[in-house]
């Protein structure tokens, strides 16, 4: 359990602030002078004279919820697409599923978000959907590659010959064997989603220019960085802590999953080697005894 402590401690701060911050923020007080410190403001004031600490408390929920929702939605679509493409015996099904994603993959993610935002005005839900859509091609290709490697094993062919259902084959064996790769990719995918959500907020997509949002705070308050840095440094550190802590937790989970597998594999190899040596010795002894009996 100790391996989870660093990641849990790091990720707990931004998560608690994002989830409980709005409940602790209270009513907004009177606005003061922009980029000042003191006068009852723990972190000073922002570019509009608002209390920076209150903006930090109320600005994390959008970034966290949108990033997590976008990552979950991306995998919700990518998992079945990748598994079907990896396990199908018909090439045209694989091409039908993967070639449109290759076309979408050729378009830069941020450019696609900006193009859609130029036509429509996505809110928070729309931004989550956009970030999920641009992450689906990469995630589907990762799922397909990991599942195809497992599907080529003789054990999977044996299960097919036994008449196992597609669901049991895909989820029970191939999906479970690919879990470590997918979990590692999920951490990277969450980091990319946070980057896209923060960048889109910088550009005014999905949130209002003066909204209480960590990404907006970094963008709008950077002009006063050398005068009042806390309105920029604190939300930026919270975003970095969220991505770093999430990846540390996933790495710890992968490390914990690797150890039982390694121990089981070692025990199995030891038993197999012991049985092989025992059989070899037994056969050698029996042959020697039979030769002596034959000579006598």
Image (cartoon, rainbow, N blue to C red):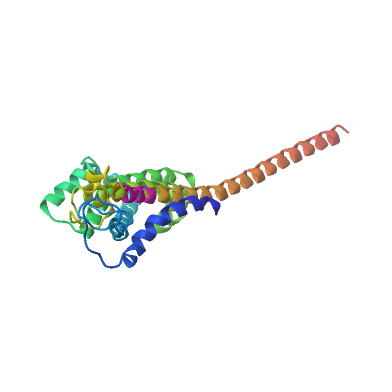
- Identify which residue is drawn at 48% across, 45% down: 154
Residue 126's x, y, as percent? 20, 57
Q: Position of residue 83 (x, y in %)?
A: 36, 51
The extreme right residue here reads: 296
Task: From the image, give the main secondary structure of the stretch colored magenta.
Answer: helix
The one nearer the camera, 6 or 71, is: 6
In which quadrant will I find the N terminus? bottom right
Q: How many marks?
A: 0
Task: Find residue 124 and report its horizontal and vertical position in percent.
Answer: 22, 59
Residue 255 shows in the view: yes
Q: Is residue 212 above or below residue 294?
A: below
**In the image shown, does 56 or 146 lie closer to the viewer?**
56
On the image, the x and y values in percent for residue 145 come to 37, 43
The residue at the point 18 percent across, 51 percent down is 204
Tell me, yes or no, whether the highlighted magenta stretch contains residue 239.
yes
Residue 173 appears in the picture as rendered: no
Question: In the rendered image, which quarter contains the C terminus?
Answer: top right
User: Residue at position x 11%, y 52% from top?
Assistant: 119
| Residue 293 located left or right of residue 187 | right
Q: Please check the rendered image and state whether residue 171 is part of the magenta-colored stretch, yes or no.
A: no
Relative placement, left or right, of 91 versus 183 is left
Location of residue 9 with respect to 95 vertically, above or below: below
Nearer to us in this view, 17 or 260: 17
Please name whichever residue, 278 or 207, is drawn nearer the observer in this view of the structure. 207
Q: Which residues are magenta?
A: 233-242
Up the image or down, 160 lies above or below 30; here it is: above
């Amino acid at each position: 359990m100790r391996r989870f402590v660093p990641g849990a401690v790091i990720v707990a701060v931004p998560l608690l602030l994002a989830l409980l911050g709005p409940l602790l923020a209270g009513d907004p007080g009177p606005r003061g002078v922009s980029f000042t410190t003191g006068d009852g403001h723990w972190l000073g004031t922002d570019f509009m004279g608002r209390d920076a600490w209150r903006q930090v408390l109320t600005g994390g929920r959008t970034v966290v919820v949108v990033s997590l929702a976008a990552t979950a939605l991306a995998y919700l679509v990518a998992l079945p697409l990748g598994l079907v493409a990896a396990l199908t015996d018909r090439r045209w099904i694989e091409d039908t599923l993967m070639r449109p994603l290759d076309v979408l993959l050729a378009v830069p993610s941020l450019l696609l978000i900006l193009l859609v935002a130029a036509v429509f005005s996505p809110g928070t839900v729309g931004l989550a959907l956009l970030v999920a859509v641009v992450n689906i091609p990469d995630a589907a290709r990762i799922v397909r590659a990991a599942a195809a490697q497992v599907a080529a094993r003789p054990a999977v062919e044996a299960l097919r010959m036994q008449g196992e259902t597609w669901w049991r084959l895909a989820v029970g064996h191939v999906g479970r064997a690919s879990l470590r790769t997918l979990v590692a990719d999920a951490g990277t995918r969450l980091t990319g989603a946070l980057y896209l959500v923060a960048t889109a907020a910088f550009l005014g997509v999905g949130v209002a220019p003066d909204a209480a949002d960590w990404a907006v705070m970094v963008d709008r308050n950077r002009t006063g960085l050398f005068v009042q840095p806390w309105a920029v440094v604190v939300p930026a550190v919270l975003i970095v802590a969220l991505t770093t802590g999430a990846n540390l937790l996933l790495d710890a989970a992968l490390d914990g999953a690797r150890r039982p597998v390694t121990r089981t594999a070692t025990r199995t190899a030891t038993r197999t080697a012991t049985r092989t040596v025992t059989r070899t010795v037994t056969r050698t002894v029996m042959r020697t005894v039979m030769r002596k009996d034959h000579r006598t």
